[in-house]
């Protein structure tokens, strides 16, 4: 295990301490719990709150999207482990401005159970909570069973649109509607080349041959749909895009946002080689790229791999995607 | 070699094509040469131009710093190889607005030779050129022999300050003075944990044991000052900071910019663990962190490792560091 760490059991706390040292005007922790994080600045009175949460090891996911025009709080667990319901509840109380809180997070059993419990606790306090669960990973379940799919990098689109809408002053039902529409309009396919190491375990999360890749693997190393020889970049992209096109209807003249997400150790160079091919394919199909994000948005520590996400836009999603936002990890003018 | 690439010989061109597809309003190539890149937008009449250049494989270095409030053009070579003098000259002609061009690049033999030749070619065209060479890497030569030191991530500070000053309307001599002062006030120490693979070669750039690190290694795998057992993160940072403090005078109340730069595959989590320790050390010494940058600014593809850079500020450097800037890879409000 080659990492810059001290005691593995302190990995998450020390990482968050570093983040709080670096961004004290943007992020703070609640009740001295380093794993309960909220915005450190004031927002307009009555703004709908948005909370997320999930395991550590995915930076900038989850806490990295707490920021202006984005979300308001995040509870984070140990590496790849859900935070507790109590932590989610603390974040909820802190960010509620009287108009309710949307829970917006990925489709994982532990997170769902804990967010549902936190919602009940908030309800007893008179805080109205709604939930939208990201399930963009096309590879994780077949068409028609979208509710069984994992949430991966595409969740970032929903932070962006729901966050911008809350910033505009929309009420909880409206913010929830936009988050759900964004999730419904998002499709992601991933591919993994190498595993990562959870600090407290100290071993690779999975093994994979020196010349192999796994298409559709999840960001915790969940099984994908095909393990095979590593292909050339363009062939990999062709296969991934075909899965996305088979899953969702895109027509000529449609406008999309493209997210090319590196899982950790894949260089930016390669993400642009991938984007190049995605661009060509969309050009051929007459689909317009309205905006693109290329970089690391949802990682798995030092895993090598990447994912391609498409968000199909309509006029209101386009306006919300284009709105400015600013977190220490994600800024748009 | 586990990479998302097509033919290795097309690696750089395909990467740059992806970048140009993604950012057509920001970057363009000159004379249809994908390796001669300049800003694609207009600047104020008479703005001093700033050009850089160097090998590929270091994204966002070099072309990623072409942007508003930053630099105007970059010529890039193959992976770890200098661009040609002719390419540098093409960039120079394209970005000159009649008030001259500063060459601002890292201290590597091939780059120096080619930039000097390009300056002569520009001179024959009546374009005045000055040069400032980044040499921030403390590990690469002893104190008193700073001119023998390699330029690494600290060069980004000089893009930022010189770029902001040119944007303000400063003349070539003044922009050159600020670039040189920034270089003079910058110190960097790096550490490497693993090699990378140059696509056209297909083999690791160096070998290093499973439990080893090399302090002071360069971003092309140049020898450092100590290879030894991988220490805990805080110990690694202590050693690196000691080298920096031994090399440059910092006093209580001094203000610095801190740059924690990941070399490629080191997760953001670890960079924040490192920042945490750097913050504590500077706190103990009474040195104030005016601004910090934490992420990937000068990489070596998928190399694992990181560097710590400090820029000592005075009032004018502070103003220039704080100015807004915007490239597709580096934005500051």
Image: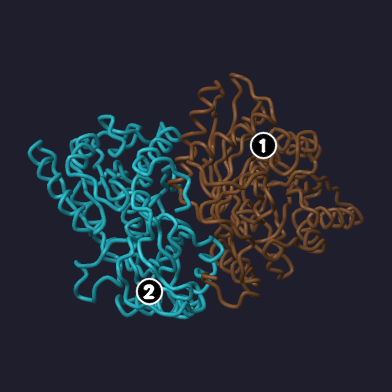
Chain colours: A brown, B cyan
Local crowd size for mark 1, using a 10 Å CA cut-off: few (<14), some (14–19), many (≥20): many
Q: Position of residue B326 (x, y in %)?
A: 42, 44
A185 over B311 or under it: above or below: above
Q: Which residue is mark 1?
A: A187
Q: Is residue B48 left or right of residue A213?
A: left
Q: Position of residue B88 (x, y in %)?
A: 21, 42
Say which mark, if any, is on residue A298: none
Q: Is residue B111 left or right of residue B284?
A: left
Q: Residue at x 55, y 29 (%)?
A: A290
- Which of the pair B169/A150 is nearer the observer? A150
Compute the Cα span from label 1 to label 2.
Answer: 43 Å
Q: Position of residue B150 (x, y in %)?
A: 26, 64
Q: Position of residue B13 (x, y in %)?
A: 35, 38
Q: Which residue is mark 2?
A: B215
In which quarter of the view is residue B31 placed?
Answer: top left
Q: Residue at x 48, y 72 (%)?
A: B210
Local crowd size for mark 2, using a 10 Å CA cut-off: few (<14), some (14–19), many (≥20): many
């Amino acid at each position: 295990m080659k990492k810059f760490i001290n005691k593995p059991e302190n990995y998450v706390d020390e990482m968050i301490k570093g983040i709080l040292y670096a961004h004290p005007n943007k992020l703070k922790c609640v009740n001295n719990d380093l794993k309960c994080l909220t915005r450190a600045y004031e927002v307009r009175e009555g703004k709908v709150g948005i909370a997320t949460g999930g395991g550590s090891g995915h930076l900038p996911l989850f806490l990295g999207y707490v920021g202006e025009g984005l979300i308001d709080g995040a509870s984070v667990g140990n590496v790849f482990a859900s935070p507790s319901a109590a932590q989610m509840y603390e974040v909820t109380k802190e960010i509620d401005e009287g108009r309710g809180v949307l829970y917006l997070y990925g489709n994982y059993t532990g997170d769902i159970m804990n967010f549902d419990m936190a919602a009940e606790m908030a309800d007893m306090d008179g805080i109205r909570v709604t939930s939208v669960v990201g399930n963009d990973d096309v590879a994780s379940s077949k068409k028609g069973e979208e509710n069984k799919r994992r949430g991966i990098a595409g969740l970032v689109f929903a932070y962006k649109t729901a966050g911008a809408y809350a910033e505009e002053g929309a009420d909880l039902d409206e913010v929830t509607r936009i988050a759900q529409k964004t999730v419904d309009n998002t499709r992601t396919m991933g591919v993994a080349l190498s595993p990562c190491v959870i600090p407290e375990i100290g071993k690779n999360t999975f093994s994979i041959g020196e010349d192999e890749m796994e298409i559709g693997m999840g960001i915790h190393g969940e099984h994908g749909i095909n393990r095979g020889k590593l292909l050339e970049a363009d062939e990999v992209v062709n296969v991934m895009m075909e899965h996305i096109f088979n899953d969702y209807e895109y027509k000529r003249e449609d406008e999309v946002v493209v997210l090319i997400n590196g899982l950790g150790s894949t260089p930016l160079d390669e993400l642009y080689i991938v984007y190049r091919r995605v661009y060509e394919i969309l050009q051929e199909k007459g689909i317009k790229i309205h905006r693109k994000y290329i970089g690391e948005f949802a990682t798995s520590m030092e895993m090598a791999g990447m994912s391609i996400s498409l968000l199909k836009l309509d006029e209101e999603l386009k306006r919300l995607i284009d709105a400015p936002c600013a977190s220490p990890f994600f800024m748009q003018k």
